[in-house]
Amino acid sequence: METIEQVLESRGIRVTAMRMLIYKFLAEKEVAVTLSDIENAFVKADRTTLYRTIKTFEEKAIVHQIDDGTGITKYALCEQGCNCDIKTDLHLHFHCNNCNETICLTDHKIPQIKVPDGFVSENVNLVVKGICDKCSG
Amino acid sequence: METIEQVLESRGIRVTAMRMLIYKFLAEKEVAVTLSDIENAFVKADRTTLYRTIKTFEEKAIVHQIDDGTGITKYALCEQGCNCDIKTDLHLHFHCNNCNETICLTDHKIPQIKVPDGFVSENVNLVVKGICDKCSG
DNA sequence: AAACCAATGCAATGGAAGTGCAATTATTAT
DNA sequence: ATAATAATTGCACTTCCATTGCATTGGTTT
Ligand SMILES: [Mn+2]
Ligand SMILES: [Mn+2]
Ligand SMILES: [Zn+2]
Ligand SMILES: [Zn+2]
C-alpha cells in the first residue's frame, strides 16, 4: 500500500505538510467536497493555499472536478483507473436533492451516447439527481 | 402557426415589447444563449429586466436552463413537447469545445441510467462535449 | 552561508447571480 | 376620462465563488 508521500511524489507533487493534510482529508471523505468544505476543515490555512493545492492536485490528476449543477465546483480523489486526465473518465456522479451531497459512482460507467452525424463526442458529463441511499433508507 | 403574443398569453405571461423582443431573439438563435448574450443584443435595456424576463420565461416553461459545465448558465426555447416543467425533459445537450457553443439535441433522448440499489433517480443532466457539426466539417 | 525556487499568505479583483426599492407603464375600476 | 391598482422596468447595491499579483516564508542546492 502506497503512503501519501509516495502518491504525491509519484505524480511530481512536492510533499508539504499542508498537501498531505488535504490529501488525507479528501481520502477520508466519501463524498465530493467544495473548496469551502476544505476551508472549514483548515481554518488556520489561507483560502488561496487550499485553492492552489486542489488545483495542483487536479493538474496532476489525483483529484477530479465535478460539476453537479449546484453552481459550486466539487472535487473528489481519483480512484484506481480514473482516467480523468485524458478526459475519458466516464463514471457517473450522483447528487442528492435531500442532503445535497454529491458522490462518485465509480463503478457505474456512462453508457455510449449517440450523437448526430457531423458531431464528435469527446467527453460526457453526466449527473444523476435524486435521493441517495442514506436519505432514502 | 402561433404568433409570439399568443405563445406568451397562452402561458399566462403578459405581453410587453421587451418580452416579445427577447422571445424573438431566442427563437432566431439556433444555440443556447447566456444572459450576457442577451445583454449584448439589447444594450439599451437593463440587465435586471433581461434577467427577470428570462426567469419568467423559465418559470412558465417556455425556456429551459442548461448547465453545460462552463459555469455560465445558458437558456434555450423549449420545443414542442419539451416537458422541462415537469422535470422530465430528457434530451441531450451538446457543447462544442471549439466554438464554445451549446445546442439542444432535441430529438436525442437521454438513455435510462442505472443507479445502485438504494438510490432514486429523479432527474438527469447529461452534456456531451466535443466538436459540433459546423466545426468538424 | 548565499542563491535559488517553490509554496504560502495577504489583498485585491472579476464575473455572474440575485434582491430592495423607486419610478414607470399597463390594467382595471369608478 | 380619471383615479386606483397592479405589474414591469431601471438603478443601485449585495453576495458568493473563483482567480490573480505580489510580497513573504521556507526548503534545497551549490
Ligand atoms: Mn467522480
Ligand atoms: Mn435543451
Ligand atoms: Zn442524500
Ligand atoms: Zn463548434
Image: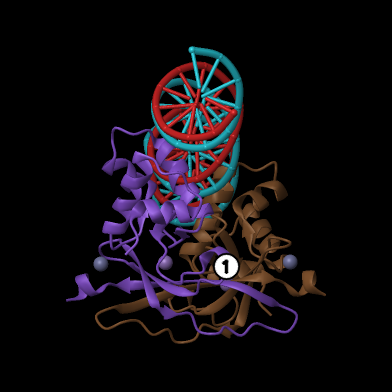
Chain colours: A purple, B brown, C cyan, D red
Residue carrying label 1? A87
Q: State whether residue A70 is above or below residue C21.
A: below
Measuring 33% from the left and 73% from the top, which residue is drawn there? A130
- The residue at the far left in this view is A137
- Write down the quadrant of residue B33 in the picture: bottom right
Measuring 26% from the left and 65% from the top, which residue is drawn there? A98
Asked which secondary structure carries label 1, the reply is loop
Which amino acid type is marked by label 1?
A: Lys
- Write down the quadrant of residue C9 in the picture: top left
Measuring 59% from the left and 81% from the top, which residue is drawn there? B80
- Write down the quadrant of residue B114 in the picture: bottom left
Q: Is residue A127 left or right of residue A95?
A: right
Q: Position of residue A77 (x, y in %)?
A: 39, 60
Residue placed most toward the observer, A10 or B50: A10
Q: Is residue B116 left or right of residue D4?
A: left
Q: Split into 4 quadrants, where in the image is the N terminus of chain B? A: bottom right
The local crowd at label 1, few if under 14, some if 14 to 19, many if 20 or more residues have their Cα within 10 Å, is few
Q: Is residue A18 left or right of residue B54?
A: left
Q: Position of residue A26 (x, y in %)?
A: 33, 55
Count the numbered circles shown: 1
Q: Split into 4 quadrants, where in the image is the C terminus of chain B? A: bottom right
Tell me, yes or no, if residue A72 can be seen here. no
Tell me, yes or no, if residue A77 can be seen here. yes
